[in-house]
Image (tube, helix red, strand yellow):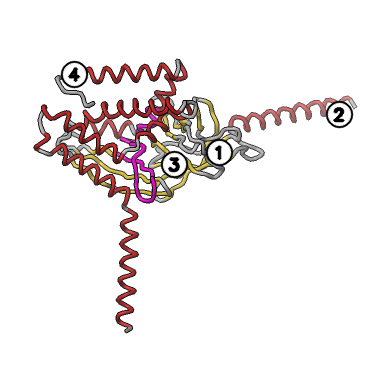
Amino acid sequence: MIGSRMIGAFVACLVVLSAVVAHAGLPTDQLKGAIERVVKTLDNPALKGEAKVAERRSAVRKIANDIFDFSEIARRSLGRHWAARSEAEQREFVMLFGDLLERAYISKIDTYGGEKIVYTGERAEGDIAVVTTKIISKNGTEVPIDYRMLRKGSDRWLVYDVNIEGVSLVSNYRTQFNKIIQTSSYAELVKKMKTKQGELSLDDDKQGKPRTQ
Amino acid sequence: MRRSGLDVAVGVFLLIGLLALGWLSVRLGRVELLGNPGYSVIADFPSVGGLKPGSSIEIAGVEIGRVDGISLHDFQARVVMTIKPHVKLQEDAIASIKTRGLIGEKYIKINPGGSEKLIKPNGKITEVEPPVDIEELISKYVFGKV
């Protein structure tokens, strides 16, 4: 009787412990899962080669949409100019900015050549977590990349900022957007982003690559 | 009688001189006589490399406060700062440690956010950028290739 009670207590302890351990690593687990899926997509022989660029990119984009909170990134990047925009403008901006980020970075991800990704730590405080990683290239150069994640719902974590070598993506865009809005106007910023969008898709066309959209 | 008049004049002159000297040292030393007006907030940086108590905190190049103290907290640098009372910081404001010029002093630049929630007194700035270590960057990209 006593033995079975002790076993019961032991099992209960194990369950509690494993729950704690699993909970502590949730942001890392989710980020790791997404990055592993991207690497798998890039390594997938069925999606390799120039002809499959569009297919490959749209697959990466889908995974990015799962782990990145693009509307949060857009809101934070626009900073204090966000609240002054109408709902329609905000929606348009999120779309434009998400497109800009994807076009600028997904083509970079395409150049991935088996660099090692190490997860060096995680720090969580309330609804915010920072997952620190390092990318180690073949010649040994280490680039620290920190992902800042926000809890959405009970156990879903989404990235809202990326810190590369200590430089924050949101901070970089916030400074640029603020400068453009203060020296000209919000309309000018949207115009600039639209031309950039056109340029980037033109680049894709020039290289004979089909557009991602 | 005339002699004592001169004494008083010298005394008064000396007193004015001393007061002026005191005022000068308070101004130059940036000492707050009546305590720091403002509220304090903290921020944890992975590194502060060269930031010191007394370093200024700026928004758009305008000083809005000063660094009160720096201590080690959970192997991170915890910076306590005093912000002027009329300046309100949003929850998503980003604090970055910058260098004035290429090799100048370090200061904290705050990039104001757009959140409706404000950071309360004794609150925390969660979004931070450590200083970019130029030497480390150079050595990494100069010596990194083996």
- Residues beneath discs 2 and 3 located on the same chain: yes
Q: Chain of mark 4?
A: A
Span shown in magenta: A145-173
* Proximity of marks 4 and 1: CB atoms separated by less than 8 Å: no
The residue carrying mark 2 is B4
The residue carrying mark 1 is B82
Q: CA distance from mark 3 to mark 1?
A: 16 Å
Q: Quadrant of residue B27?
A: top right
Around disc 3, counting alpha carbons within 10 Å, would you say few (fewer than 14), some (14 to 19), or many (20 or more)? some
Check the image and name the residue furthest to the right.
Answer: B1
Q: Quadrant of residue A68?
A: top left
Q: Amino acid at mark 4?
A: Asp
Q: Amino acid at mark 2?
A: Ser
Image point 30% across, 28% down: which residue? A101
Image point 42% across, 34% down: which residue? B96
* Frontmost residue, A186 versus A90: A90
Q: Chain of mark 3?
A: B
* Frontmost residue, A129 versus A94: A94
Q: CA distance from mark 3 to mark 4?
A: 42 Å
Q: Amino acid at mark 3?
A: Thr
Q: Earlier in the sequence, mark 2 or mark 1?
A: 2
Element carrying mark 2: helix
